[in-house]
Image (tube, grey):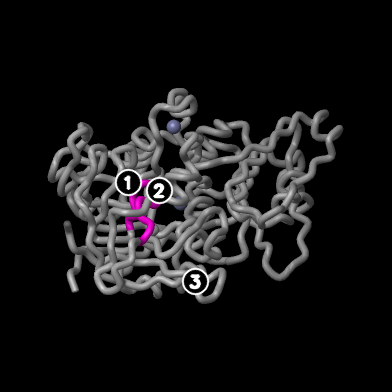
Amino acid sequence: MVSTPAIVAREPKDIGHPNWQIEDVSVSEPGDNEILVEMIASGVCHTDLVLSSLPPGYMGIEYPKIVGHEGAGYVKQTGQSVHSVSVGDPVLLSFHSCGSCSQCDDDHPAYCDTFARENYIGRQGSVTTTNTGDKPWARFFGQSSFARCSVVDESCVVNAKGLLQSPEELKLFAPLGCGFQTGMGAVANIANAGAKDVVVVLGLGSVGMAAIMTAAIRGCKAIVGVDRLDDRLALAKELGATHTLNTAGSDMDLAEAVRALVPAGASLVVDTTGVPKLLEGGLEALRQRGKLVMIGVPPPGFELSVKATEHMNMGRSVMGCIEGDCIPKEAIPEMIRWYRDGRFPFDRLITYFEAHRFDQALKQLHDGSAVKAVLLWDSRE
Ligand SMILES: [Zn+2]
Ligand SMILES: [Zn+2]
């Protein structure tokens, strides 16, 4: 048993707003395929907020729980069957996959048969709250990184021993395991974008910014960033956007606005917003053989309709996207190589917060003044 502080998500008092608090918990020994990780830093991803602010019972969600699905730390203890890391190794954390279903076998672990259950719900039993004796749901995305110490599944772990130039880099690389990888993979894996592509990115959070940077790396001939915040649009230009559109305060027709910039329309639209009007506009903005890649979560029950004959004649595609269809053990080192070459400056998007100041992180994510919040566990209270 290890005693550790964790951000425990209690049942939301106000649906749509997470009810997080720092609590002391005890964590049991790692099982056969598990690793006890002492976290240095945890990235906050939008899914942490969504899946801890829904009502209990919805999608199988229960409270209390410990979320967090981007992280970095050091291996403290390993289960008997663990071979990829040893005690003392630095590790970066990503999503869980089973390694044996047909999708995992085919090198598409983001579509693993067990993905929803192991990542969105997790498991109960290994963590106990000190004050109340509750057993929070843990192993969220196989890791529950919002704790100084957490038991994680080996499938989530990327050994960072050969990736770091200094220990300081661990906290910088902590958020690579979900949001950045998703935006990168949408452009590089799902769309396989290249020099002839005209790319439109809807929403410029960490996912959208990663898509912009990757489109620039791929040499795409036009890259249009779309957001409601001027600061984000300005930053997107510095990261590789050739054009920007601000959708705030106007009843903009997105397809028309895109065609005013690139008359033939877009060959790739990456949506990170889930906003129905933008999804519909994004689809309309596509040229022949264009692809709409859906990352943002639309409202429950929303159906995206297509004009079937036009869709067929234009050869358009609408594609779902989880985790950029990435294999984390390959995607994370690749992003680090690009970062070292100066082509993927994701460090410019990070704001650090002490873990106990998570409320400030949430506030700045909400008002847009932070693109990617990273919580630090290294200063002991
Ligand atoms: Zn699988
Ligand atoms: Zn995420």
Q: Earlier in the sequence, mark 1 or mark 2?
A: 1
Image: magenta residue range:
136-145
Q: Earlier in the sequence, mark 3 or mark 2?
A: 3
Q: Amino acid at mark 1?
A: Leu
Q: Residue at x 47, y 69 (%)?
A: 11
Q: Is mark 2 within 8 Å of ligand 2?
A: yes
Q: Is residue 254 left or right of residue 210?
A: right
Numbered circle sitting on residue 254: none
SS type, badge 2: helix
Q: Is residue 317 left or right of residue 42?
A: right
| Residue situated in front as seen by the camera: 121 or 262 | 121
- Cβ–Cβ below 8 Å for labels 3 and 1? no
Residue 75 in view here: yes
Work out how far the residue at label 1 is from the one at label 2, CA to CA, in angstroms.
Answer: 9 Å
SS type, badge 1: strand
Work out how far the residue at label 3 is from the one at label 1, CA to CA, in angstroms.
Answer: 26 Å
The residue furthest right is: 309
Q: Quadrant of residue 58?
A: bottom right
User: In this figure, which residue is indicated by the disc labeled 2?
Assistant: 141
| Residue situated in front as seen by the camera: 327 or 341 | 327
Q: Residue at x 19, y 68 (%)?
A: 379
Residue neighbourhood size for the residue with mark 1, other residues' Cα within 10 Å, grouped as few (<14), some (14–19), many (≥20) = many
Q: Amino acid at mark 2?
A: Phe
Numbered circle sitting on residue 93: 1
Query: Is residue 132 placed above or below 188 in the rendered structure?
Result: below
